[in-house]
Image (tube, helix red, strand yellow):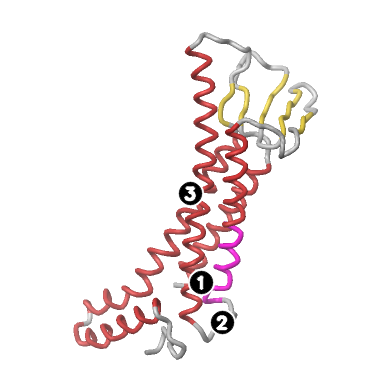
Amino acid sequence: MVVLQLTAFGLALLSALFLVTATWTDCWMVNTDDSLEVSHKCRGLWRECVTNMQDGIKTCDQYDSILADHPLKIVVTRALLISADLLAGFALLTLLFGLDCVTFLKEEPHVKLKLCYMAGLVLGTGSVLGLVGSVWYAVDVYMERATLVSHNVFLGVHYDFGWSCWLGMAGAMGCLVASVVLTCCLFLFRVLGPRIKAKKNPASHRVVQDIFHYQLSCTFKSPPSCNCDHP
């Protein structure tokens, strides 16, 4: 079970870094016009940057104050991504205390197990927010471009999804996978594992069944004297 926890923690940490990086980088939209060989233009959630392809000089224009009027896609994506970042950070901290290899609450295994489950639920919530924010932005970019094309409007620059947008989607999906590992997989391994082993050894079936019911009550009721490892 420790391997499962560490795998989920590593995946959650990497995914959270992806989300934070996506939130604060400046390439959510990138120009895709092949005729523009002089400069490379990117738009992010906080500023717009242009890189000169000849000398590599990058100049950025900061957007107006956060309280100013902005396009809906920027406002919604900002709110969802920042919320996802905060939830992912809180989930990582909770999961850290719930790891079996951490001495914190070592004598309270049922509490550590609940911390893992809670971290999984929080990660799942953050992943949904991050995924909705990233996909919302990507769909809005696509619809904006499709509308211009359908009306035969050519502005000289066409935008496509930038690497920040893809990074946000990847981070959200990673958090979702880590959430599944911490909730579904961890529950199956912890509670149902003994029953699977019992089928291979019928002589110990009754003992394992008692352990199963004890661990199940430990997980959800968690009495003060409960020790999930030793009934």
Q: Nearer the viewer, residue 138 or 160?
A: 138
- Structural crowding at the residue carrying mark 3, measured as other residues with C-alpha within 10 Å and reported as few (<14), some (14–19) or many (≥20): some
Where residue 220 appears, as percent x and y from the top left, is: 39, 76
Where residue 19 appears, as percent x and y from the top left, is: 59, 48
Q: Which mark is residue 105?
A: 2
Above/below status of 13 relative to 24: below
Kindly report the distance in space between the C-alpha atoms of the residues bearing marks 3 and 2: 30 Å
Given the current orientation, which residue lies at the most extreme top position? Answer: 152
Amino acid type indicated by mark 2: Leu
Look at mark 3 in the image and give the residue it sits on. 128
- Structural crowding at the residue carrying mark 1, measured as other residues with C-alpha within 10 Å and reported as few (<14), some (14–19) or many (≥20): many
Residue 182 sits in quarter? bottom left
Q: Residue at x 76, y 23 (%)?
A: 52
Proximity of marks 1 and 2: CB atoms separated by less than 8 Å? yes
Where residue 113 appears, as percent x and y from the top left, is: 46, 74
Q: What's drawn in magenta, residue-wise?
A: 88-101
Look at mark 1 in the image and give the residue it sits on. 115
With 204 as the anchor, is 2 left or right in this view?
A: right
Amino acid type indicated by mark 1: Leu
| Element under disc 1 | helix
Q: Nearer the viewer, residue 155 or 34?
A: 155
- Structural crowding at the residue carrying mark 2, measured as other residues with C-alpha within 10 Å and reported as few (<14), some (14–19) or many (≥20): some
Where residue 223 appears, as percent x and y from the top left, is: 43, 86
Q: Earlier in the sequence, mark 1 or mark 3?
A: 1
Quarter containing the C terminus? bottom left
